[in-house]
Amino acid sequence: MTSPLFPDEPAIPVAGTPLAERMRPRTFDEFVGQSPLLGPDRPLRQAIERGVLHSLILWGPPGTGKTTIARLLASVAGGDFVAFSAVTSGIKEIKEVIAAADLRRRRTGRRTILFVDEIHRFNKAQQDAFLPHVEGGTIVLVGATTENPSFEVNSALLSRSKVYVLEPLTTGNVVVILRRALADTERGLGRSGVEADDETLAAIAVYANGDARVALNLLEQAVALVEPPTSDGIRLLDIPTLAALIERRSLLYDKSGEEHYNLVSALHKSIRNSDADAAIYWLARMLEAGEDPLYVARRLVRFASEDVGNADPRALEIALACKDAVHFLGMPEANTALAQCVTYLSAAPKSNAVYVAYGAAARDALNDVASPVPLHLRNAPTGLMKGLGYGAGYKYAHDEAEGVSEMSSLPAHLEGRRYYQPTDRGIEARIKEALERARKLRMKT
């Protein structure tokens, strides 16, 4: 048998404690999910059970067990657990916690497991305040974050911590947790007499989107709405009761976080791959989660130039028209304008030749900032400038029989450089033909 996580805690939880907190796993055997991290032979579990304490960052979605893992580490490995929230605390509170941890270590020899929830909300100075105390062993830092630590945690702190990635719980994982809560008469809802079928529990699990806390709290609310027992003494939680509680599925989405950029990336890459069905899905994911429709419209305007370009010049017109429609209509009516634009861009021929051309030209421009404009391309509005040779040798293209002169328009050392290389797709094929013709005319002597 695995020892309880908090043996001194009362068997009966304090009244009013949310179900999700009451059902928090007390042992590894009770933990559901994250088997790649917490399976019997996995490194993190072995380290905890052996008392090998090291600072770590737990990165994963809400409700996947980050806090519980930190508590297990403290209990099993023999440390004092101190929870600390980055939302409500600052440098002052950090210093107070560190001072208490230092005193505890000197008096008792016990180390403090400092659990920092939402560590990504700390700024650089606040994160730096932990560094000397992590290095000196005063604390074992366990940071929890829903954001990519590569971007949100200081490199110095990150280099002194091991990052563990937690995955969303599966629907099956969540159903197991819900079943356990319904049956548990000590900490759960076992005394309520409520029963639920697999379909209803699966619906709760799908709604929770891999978040055990959301699932358990929803179950607790739903049980409170269940009608009194029928003549056979059964209280049944069913889909209609659940539907009355759930008006709309809450999607995991943070407009400033990694999921925001993940969805934008998925939309962009689906359109680029001409997959209209996938593009519509990712668009809906963003809009239904509350994304700013004008932000989406701006990304589509960018896409029209970056990935369609001159293969279909109308793509930019349509994207701009979509932006105007979004601004004029607002949501939810603008969703169809965005969907129309997404499907058009998906079907359009693709070319990134304009994007590549500008990138190459920009690199040369940055490395060649002092290159003077050739004299024949300069305007000469004054006599002095004419006397200096400004405009001398300029060939007016409209005076040429073919509309193209042999004049070079690049600095001499870049003569012959080709930045824009059109593809053979869509209208760009005709543009390619016209530019090749002009290039040949310029090469005539």
Image (tube, rainbow, N blue to C red):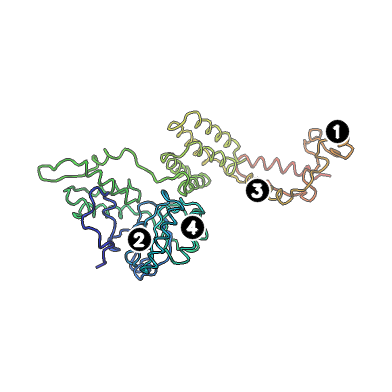
**The disc labelled 4 sits on which kind of residue?**
Ala
Q: Amino acid at mark 3?
A: Gly
The answer to whether the residue labelled 3 contacts the one labelled 2, judged by CB atoms less than 8 Å apart, is no
Measured as percent of width and height from the top left, residue 8 is found at 25, 61
Image quarter (top left, top right, bottom left or bottom right) of the C terminus: top right
Q: Residues within 10 Å of mark 2 (few under 14, many from 20)?
A: some
Q: Residue at x 57, y 37 (%)?
A: 315
403 lies above or below 156: above
Instruction: Decide which of tag 1 and tag 4 comes sooner along the chain.
Output: 4
* Nearer the camera: disc 3 or disc 2: 2
Q: Amino acid at mark 2?
A: Phe
Q: Position of residue 192 (x, y in %)?
A: 17, 48
Inter-mark Cα distance, 4 to 3: 41 Å
Please tell me whether mark 2 or mark 1 is closer to you in this view: 2
Q: Residue at x 41, y 41 (%)?
A: 289
Question: Label 1 amino acid?
Answer: Thr
Residue of label 3: 359
Residue wearing tag 2: 81
- For label 1, count other residues whose C-alpha is less than 10 Å away and answer few (under 14), some (14-19) or many (20+): few
Q: Residues within 10 Å of mark 4 (few under 14, many from 20)?
A: some
C-alpha gap between disc 1 and disc 3: 36 Å
Nearest to the eye among marks 1 and 3: give it.
1
Cα distance in 3D space between marks 2 and 1: 80 Å
Q: Earlier in the sequence, mark 4 or mark 3?
A: 4
